[in-house]
Every structure is written in structure tokens, then in C-alpha cells.
Image (tube, rainbow, N blue to C red):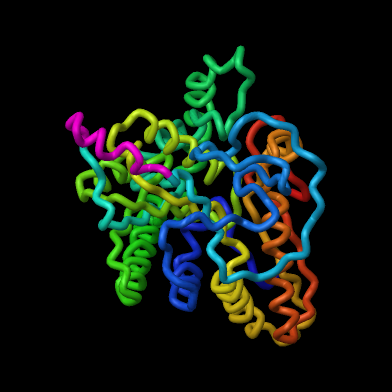
Amino acid sequence: MAALLPSSRSCGMHSSRAEAHSYASCSAPQPQLVPIRRRGRHWACGCRGTCSPQASLNPLGPKHQHPKRLAPTPALTSDIPVRNLQDSTFAGASAAAGRGAAVPSTEKVGVLLLNLGGPDTLEDVQPFLYNLFADPEIIRLPGYARFLQPFIAQAISTLRAPQSSEGYKAIGGGSPLRRITEEQAQALADALHAKGVPANVYVGMRYWHPYTEEALEQIKRDGVGRLVILPLYPQFSISTSGSSLRLLETIFKEDSYLKLLRHTVIPSWYQRRGYVMAMVDLIEQELIKFDKQEEVEIFFSAHGVPKSYVEEAGDPYKEEMEECVALIMGELGARGHANHHTLAYQSRVGPAEWLKPY
């Protein structure tokens, strides 16, 4: 096994270099908060032109039937696939101001980085796991059984905490995800400032501090009026980016300030040239350590999701992961490497069938 591609779900822990590479090498204009449609596919559900994009943060939108998807030919892109979610955000701003509601400043731009989160200390492991398994996008229960969610989360987190704590103990007593994500945020802010975009960059974690709610409160205090929402998961999944976007949708609906905030989502970016090149660079760094490079197997380890997410809920994660691997192997081939590779999925929970091969 020559090189291990980091799990998509934990990508924020591993891809700081890739992010810096992607943004530093990008020659495209910086985000102007205008609608740029992703070609050939609704960004949220994976449909190919059969669904109407919704002006909502809901990652799956309304319930609908999905046709059988045809695998596209992967292609690198330098376009940022963003979805403008509120084209008429400021239509009622004057009226809101007259009612005394806070109105976002259109001049202040922010970027919100979304990530999973992780326990800072060993004492945080069990409550972090509880937050994770209490999320209905992680353990999807039928409507009649949803009242069991907190009890199931408590049981699983209590059972898994000792083993998980041993893992965190082995890497220093806590997750480095917060530190690395904050370093990414600073690197992105510096790159944007260097390009004449004085944007503030915020970090919002789904299951631990700094929570997404904390980041939004800071965004409001800073008077941000235009916001780019960037999940740090290269591939979209309803259990990662989708979960965070559902949370944002709920918060935005209930907050008078955020209702008026003009915002744009970058749903996935696995096909960005900077990201792909960074992954290939990392693999090449490992290949040169072997005497017979051509015999080395390249092993891609991705976080799994239940098979039902893909087949029943329309999650594009598997398709996007396979496209991502194809792009990476294509670039490796262009650089003269014809190694065999394997893509497998890890981290199963519960009795349901998950993506294979394990």
C-alpha cells in the first residue's frame, strides 16, 4: 500500500495543503455572490436536469423521484460550482429596517467554513459522539421511531467512547481538527486579502466547538452582509455537507438578521484542479519512497455511508467519490504513473448495509 487518500468525511483534518493550493493557484475571479449553476446536475440531489433548484439551504429540497443516473466523464474544472440561494434577499430590507430589524451590510463579505468538529480533550469524547449520533442525518430513523434518537445516541456514544478515547489518546489526547481548520481559515483569509477581497473567514463545526451557531453569532456581530458557505468536504453527502446545510436552513428561517443575509453555497469541489493536483503531489511524494514504483498499489480510503443513502435518498456521494478518484488517477497517468488502485469505504455503524467494498 503506497498512498492513503484521506477520508472525505474527515477531509478538514488532512486537506489544509490542498485548500491552500486550490485557492492560491486559482486564476478565476473571486466570488462575486452571483448564481453560477453547476452544469448538468442539481447541486443538492444529484439529478441531471429533472429537478428545479430550490432557493433554500435544504440539501435535498422537496421530495421527488430520481431517474437512473448515468456516470459522466470526469473533467477537471477551475469553475467554482456555487448555488446562489437567495437572489432577492434584500427585497424587503428597507421594510425590515423600518420595523427596527437589523439589516446586514452589503459591503462586508464573509466566508463560513463548515466542518465536522472533534473533541478537544478526552473528556469531550462521549458528548461529541452523542452530538454526532443524535443527528438524524447520521442515524436515519423512520418517523414513528424518531423519539428514540436521543436514547440511541446515548447508548452508542457511551459504548464507543472508551475505544474512541484510546484512539484520541494515541494522537495527543484530542482531535487536531479545530486547529487545522482554523489554520485553513487563516490561510484562506490571507489569500483572499492578497487578491483584494477583504473577507472575514469563520469556522463552524457541526458537532463540537466552535459550533455553527457560534460562528453565525460572530458573523452577525461583524455585520456581514454577503456570505460564501464552503463545506470542507470535497464530495457532497447528505450526512456531511447536507447535515450542516439543513442546520443552517433551520437557523436562517428563525433569525431576522440571517433571513436578509445574501448567501452562496459551494456544495462540492472534488473536481477543482488545485485539489486534484495537491492530492497527486502527495501521492507522488510517497511513490518515490519505493524502489519499484510501478508495482505499488494506491489505496483510496473513503468514509462510507449506508447504501440506502445513495439508492433511496439520492445521495451523490458515491458517484462524486468515484469521479474524484478517476480524476486523480487520470492526472497520475498523465505524469507517467500507471499504478493499479483500489477504492474502499470504512467506518460502518449499525446493521445496515454500507457502501462496498469495505
> What segment carries the magenta color?
88-101
Q: Residue at x 44, y 46 (%)?
A: 87
Q: Position of residue 81 (x, y in %)?
A: 56, 59
Residue 10 in view in this figure: no
Left or right of residue 175: residue 285: right
In the foreground, 152 or 314: 314
Residue 91 lies in magenta, yes or no?
yes
In the foreground, 291 or 338: 338
Residue 182 in view in this figure: yes
Q: Position of residue 213 (x, y in %)?
A: 33, 38
Q: Position of residue 323 (x, y in %)?
A: 71, 61
What kind of secondary structure does the magenta stretch mostly adopt?
A: helix
Q: Is residue 232 above or below residue 60?
A: below
Q: Quadrant of residue 179?
A: bottom left
Q: Quadrant of residue 71?
A: bottom right
Where the N terminus falls, by quadrant? bottom right
Q: Residue at x 50, y 71 (%)?
A: 22
Residue 100 lies in magenta, yes or no?
yes
Q: Position of residue 202 (x, y in %)?
A: 32, 54
Q: Is residue 186 above or below residue 105?
A: below
Q: Is residue 88 above or below residue 13?
A: above
Q: Is residue 237 above or below residue 179?
A: above
